[in-house]
Image (cartoon, helix red, strand yellow):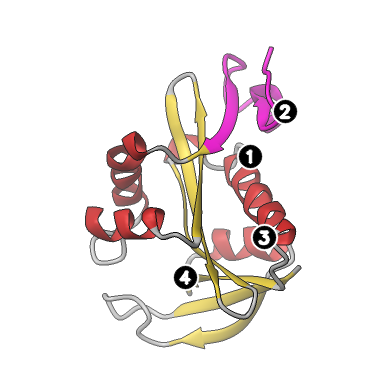
Amino acid sequence: MCKGLFSVPQAAISPFGRRPVRNCMKLRAFKRSDLAALHRIDQSCFPPGISYSARELDRFVSHAKSQTWVAEDGAGIAGFLILAQEPQKVGHIVTIDVIESQRRSGVGTMLMDAAETWAARKGLRLIYLETADDNRPAQAFYAARGYAKVDEVANYYPNGQTAWVMVKWL
């Protein structure tokens, strides 16, 4: 049985039986010892030039006004999310990364729930993020959570790709 405030039984995450019911998915705060694993996950989730260098990732997770959540089960880290608190009571989701085998299993939802709850408790007015213009699954995921496309930014990514800025008012 899963225990803890942010523990979710695997069966609750995947009601369609895509993953065997073995472990509990737990959400916890980032630890320094996670950095190498988070960097490997980011490198696997995004192509070179879009994924962060280890130094960039370290800067984001170490920033005094950022919060990082890590989702893990018995097999290891399944994903993570970094939220930076910006002026004017704004939150910026720097990245949300979920390993391929755990996508569509509820990990992203659990991470987004934690970030949005934290932001609301901190009194933030809105959260925004950027997503590639061709990443339709991510856009649909965010839209279902109440995020709206507000700006299209040409050449946002180093490879010249366009991004959508999506915003959710809290």
Q: Do the residues labelled 4 and 2 touch (CB within 8 Å)?
A: no
**Residue bounds of the magenta highlight:** 1-28
On residue 119, which mark appears?
A: 3
Q: Which amino acid does label 1 sit on?
A: Gly
Give me the residue at 30% from left, 81% from top: 160
Q: Give the quadrant of the N terminus.
A: top right
Examine the rendering and report whether any part of residue 53 can be seen: no
Q: In which quarter of the image is residue 100?
A: top left
On residue 106, which mark appears?
A: 1
**Measured from the top left, where is residue 38 in percent x and y?**
35, 43
On residue 134, which mark appears?
A: 4
Q: Does the magenta stretch include residue 149?
A: no
Mark before the other along the chain sequence, 1 or 3: 1
Answer few, some or many: residues within 10 Å of disc 3's Cα (few below 14, many 20 plus, some between 14 and 19).
many
Image height of 126 relative to 54, above or below: below
Which is in the foreground here, disc 4 or disc 2?
Answer: 2
